[in-house]
C-alpha cells in the first residue's frame, strides 16, 4: 500500500469537503425547513423536499414489539369481548370464552366479527391451536382471519400436518400458499402481522384488487399478494362491488383455537389537509378563473363547519375555484381548532385572487405567516368574518410577527385594527343571550354588496367597534335584540343608540405596498349562516373583492344543503377534537 504525505492527504480532504455533494446539502434553518424551488415530483403535486408537504403524524410505538402503538384500535386486550359480536347479527353477544387472557373458540357456537369496520389496515393478531392434537389436515386447529368478511388468511395447525398447500396456515385461503411454513408447535403462540389493502371499484368495475402482505412469526410469507377474489371453498369467486370497509371476522371451524393481543391500525393515504373545490364547469358563471382561499381556525364559532359550506356555494353556484384551510393538529393530522399553531396550505394564498378569513387568536410559525404577509403586501382583497378582527395572538412568543398580535402597542391593535379596521374590543350585546339583527345603513343602501340582502339575523351577539376609521363604509348596523329569536324586539337604551357597525368595507395598505380592499362582518358563527341573506352578503362581497362588482346578481343564489346542520357556538375541551378525528373531507356538506 502506498501512503500519501500527511500534507497531501489534508489537502485532498479539504478539496473533497468543498465538492457539491447534494446528499449532504445543508437544510434551511428554522421550523419551516424545506424548499420551495426544487423540481416537482412526478404527478406535479409536491416538490422535492417541499416545505409545505404535511409532516407525518407522530405515533408512540408500543412499549415492546407487538404491543399496540398509540394510534391503534385495540380489539382484544385479554379482558373483554366488547369489540366483538356474533357474526351475522346486529348486536348479539360474542359467544366465545376468555381464558388466561385469551379468547377461545367455543366450537359450533358461531363465528365472531368486529363491531367496527376497516378498510386498508395493519392488523396484528396472535393465535394458538390446541396443545392436544386431534384430527388431521384441515381438522387440526382450523380457524381463519377473514378481512372485510371476504378475504381470508388461514389459521391452522400446520406443524407436521400434511394438507393442501393453499389451506396451510398463513395461506390466502384457496388461492396462494405461504412462501414458507413457519408454524409453531401445537399449543404455542403464533403471530400474524397483516398489511391489507382493500380493493377499489368504480361502479361495477374492479380497478384495483385486494392485496395482502403477511408476516408470520417474523417471517415474510405473503408479499403484497393480490387476491384473486373473495375466499371460497372448492371454488373461485369473482369480485363484486362492496363497501370500502368491513368487519374483521374470526372463524368458528369447530376447533378450540385461541386468539390474543388483537389490534388494528387504519392506514392513512397521503391526503391534503385542506379541501379543494374547483368551480363548476359552466363557463357562463362569473367566478370562473377566480381563486378564493377560505381560512378557518377559531375555537368557538365553528368556522371549520361554515367555510366548507360557503365554498360549496361559491364553487358550485358561482364558479369560483375554492380552497378551504383548517387548523390541523400535527399529532393526528385531523381538524383541531384548539390547536392554534398550524394551518397547512397557506401557500395557496400566493396565487389567490381573494381570501376569506375566519380565524381567532392564531399563533402560527413565521414560515406560515409569511404567506399572509405576502398576500397583504401585494394589496390583495380579503374578507374578515366574526373573530378575524383578532386573528393572531403572539403574546409572550418570539416571532417576526409580534406586531400583528391583536393587542400590539407598537402597531396599535395589530393586523385586525390596522388591516381590517378593528381588533377585539368587547361583546356589545349579551353573549348567548342577545342575538343580532342586521340593519341596512341608509347611506349605503345602494351598494351592490347589499343586493338581495334584506333580513340578516344571527344568534351571535353584536361586537363592540370603536377603532373603525371614518373612511370605512358601513353597510350594516348591528341591532341588539332582547332574546335569541328573530321575532324578539330590539333592546331599548344605549346599546342601540347608536348601533355598532356590523359590516363594512375599507381600504388598507401594508408597508407602503399597493392598496387593497377589505370587507368585514362581525357576524359569522356557523349557525348565523343558516340565515339566507347573511350567506348572500358573503357571496356578494366575494364578487366585489374579485373585481366582479358589476356582475353581482340582484338576488344571488345561495342554496344550502339540507344536511348543513352546524354546531352551536361554544368552546370544546382539549380532547374533543383529538377524539373525533375529523378529516377536512368529512366537513364537505353532502
Image: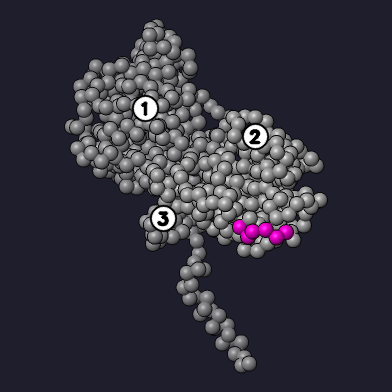
Magenta-drawn stretch, dominant element (helix, strand or loop): loop
Residue 87, magenta (yes or no)? no
Seen in the image, is 493 located left or right of residue 216?
A: left
Which residue lies under the disc numbered 3? Answer: 46
Camera-side mark, 2 or 1 = 2
Classed neighbour count for the residue bearing mark 1: other residues with Cα under 10 Å, few (<14), some (14–19), many (≥20) = few
Identify the disc placed on residue 241.
none
Residue 165 position, x and y percent, is 63, 60
Instruction: Identify the residue at the far bottom of this view.
Output: 2
Q: Give me the residue at 56% from left, 87% from top.
A: 8
Please give the residue where the numbered disc 1 appears in the rendered image.
561
Could you tell me how far apart the alpha carbons at marks 2 and 1 are, in whole angstroms?
38 Å
Q: Are marks 2 and 1 in contact (CB under 8 Å)?
A: no
Say whether residue 57 is left or right of residue 189.
left
Q: State which region is magenta.
A: 161-166
Look at 56% across and 54% down and name the residue there: 212
Instruction: Work out whether mark 2 precedes mark 1 in sequence or the reverse, and give the earlier one.
Output: 2
Q: Above or below — where is 129 with respect to 528? A: below
Q: Is residue 100 visible?
A: yes
To which quarter of the image does residue 275 belong? top left
289 or 493: nearer the eye? 289
Amino acid at each position: 500500500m502506498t501512503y500519501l504525505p500527511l500534507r497531501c492527504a489534508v489537502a485532498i480532504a479539504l478539496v473533497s469537503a468543498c465538492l457539491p455533494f447534494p446528499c449532504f446539502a445543508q437544510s434551511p434553518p428554522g421550523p419551516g425547513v424545506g424548499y420551495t424551488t426544487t423540481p416537482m415530483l412526478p404527478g406535479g403535486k409536491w416538490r422535492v423536499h417541499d416545505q409545505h408537504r404535511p409532516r407525518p403524524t407522530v405515533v408512540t410505538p408500543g412499549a415492546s414489539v407487538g404491543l399496540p402503538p398509540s394510534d391503534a384500535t385495540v380489539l382484544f386486550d385479554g379482558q373483554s369481548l366488547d369489540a366483538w359480536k356474533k357474526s351475522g347479527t346486529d348486536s348479539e353477544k360474542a359467544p366465545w370464552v376468555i381464558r388466561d387472557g385469551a379468547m377461545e373458540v367455543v366450537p359450533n357456537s358461531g363465528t365472531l366479527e368486529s363491531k367496527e369496520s376497516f378498510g386498508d389496515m395493519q392488523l396484528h393478531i396472535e393465535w394458538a391451536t390446541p396443545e392436544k392434537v386431534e384430527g388431521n389436515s384441515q381438522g387440526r386447529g382450523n380457524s381463519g382471519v377473514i378481512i372485510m368478511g371476504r378475504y381470508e388468511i388461514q389459521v391452522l395447525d400446520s406443524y407436521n400436518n400434511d394438507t393442501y398447500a393453499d389451506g396451510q396456515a398463513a395461506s390466502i385461503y384457496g388461492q396462494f400458499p405461504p412462501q414458507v411454513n413457519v408454524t409453531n408447535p401445537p399449543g404455542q403462540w403464533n403471530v400474524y402481522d397483516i398489511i391489507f389493502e382493500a380493493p377499489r371499484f368504480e361502479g361495477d368495475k374492479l380497478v384495483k384488487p385486494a392485496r395482502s402482505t403477511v408476516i408470520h412469526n417474523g417471517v415474510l410469507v405473503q408479499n403484497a399478494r393480490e387476491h384473486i377474489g373473495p375466499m371460497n371453498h372448492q371454488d373461485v369467486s369473482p369480485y363484486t362491488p362492496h363497501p370500502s370497509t368491513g368487519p374483521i371476522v374470526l372463524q368458528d371451524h369447530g376447533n378450540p383455537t385461541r386468539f390474543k393481543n388483537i389490534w388494528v391500525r387504519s392506514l392513512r393515504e397521503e391526503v391534503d389537509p385542506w379541501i379543494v373545490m374547483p368551480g363548476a364547469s359552466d363557463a357562463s358563471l362569473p367566478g370562473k378563473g377566480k381563486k378564493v382561499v377560505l381560512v378557518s381556525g377559531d375555537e368557538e364559532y365553528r368556522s371549520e363547519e361554515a367555510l366548507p359550506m360557503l365554498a360549496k356555494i361559491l364553487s358550485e353556484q358561482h364558479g369560483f375555484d375554492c380552497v378551504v384551510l383548517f387548523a390541523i393538529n400535527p399529532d393526528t393530522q385531523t381538524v383541531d381548532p384548539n390547536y392554534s399553531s398550524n394551518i397547512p396550505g397557506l401557500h395557496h394564498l400566493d396565487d389567490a385572487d381573494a381570501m376569506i378569513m375566519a380565524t381567532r387568536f392564531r399563533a402560527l410559525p413565521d414560515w406560515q405567516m409569511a404567506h399572509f404577509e405576502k398576500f397583504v403586501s401585494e394589496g390583495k382583497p380579503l374578507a374578515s368574518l366574526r373573530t378575524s378582527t383578532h386573528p393572531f395572538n403572539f403574546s409572550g412568543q418570539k416571532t417576526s410577527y409580534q406586531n400583528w398580535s391583536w393587542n400590539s402597542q407598537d402597531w396599535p391593535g395589530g393586523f385586525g385594527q390596522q388591516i381590517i379596521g378593528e381588533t377585539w374590543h368587547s361583546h356589545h350585546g349579551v353573549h348567548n343571550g342577545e342575538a343580532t339583527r342586521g340593519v341596512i345603513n341608509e347611506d349605503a343602501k345602494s351598494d351592490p354588496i347589499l343586493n338581495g340582502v334584506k333580513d340578516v339575523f344571527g344568534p351571535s351577539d353584536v361586537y363592540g367597534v370603536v377603532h373603525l376609521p371614518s373612511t370605512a363604509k358601513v353597510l350594516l348596523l348591528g341591532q341588539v335584540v332582547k332574546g335569541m329569536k328573530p321575532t324578539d324586539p330590539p333592546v331599548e337604551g344605549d346599546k342601540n343608540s347608536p348601533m355598532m357597525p356590523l359590516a363594512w368595507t375599507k381600504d388598507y395598505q401594508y408597508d407602503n405596498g399597493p392598496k387593497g380592499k377589505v370587507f368585514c362582518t362581525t357576524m359569522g358563527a356557523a349557525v348565523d349562516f343558516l340565515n339566507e341573506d347573511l350567506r348572500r352578503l358573503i357571496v356578494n362581497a366575494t364578487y366585489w373583492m374579485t373585481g366582479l362588482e358589476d356582475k353581482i346578481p340582484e338576488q344571488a343564489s345561495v342554496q344550502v344543503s339540507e344536511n348543513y346542520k352546524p354546531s352551536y357556538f361554544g368552546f370544546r375541551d382539549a380532547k374533543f377534537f383529538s377524539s373525533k378525528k375529523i378529516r377536512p373531507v368529512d366537513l364537505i356538506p353532502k
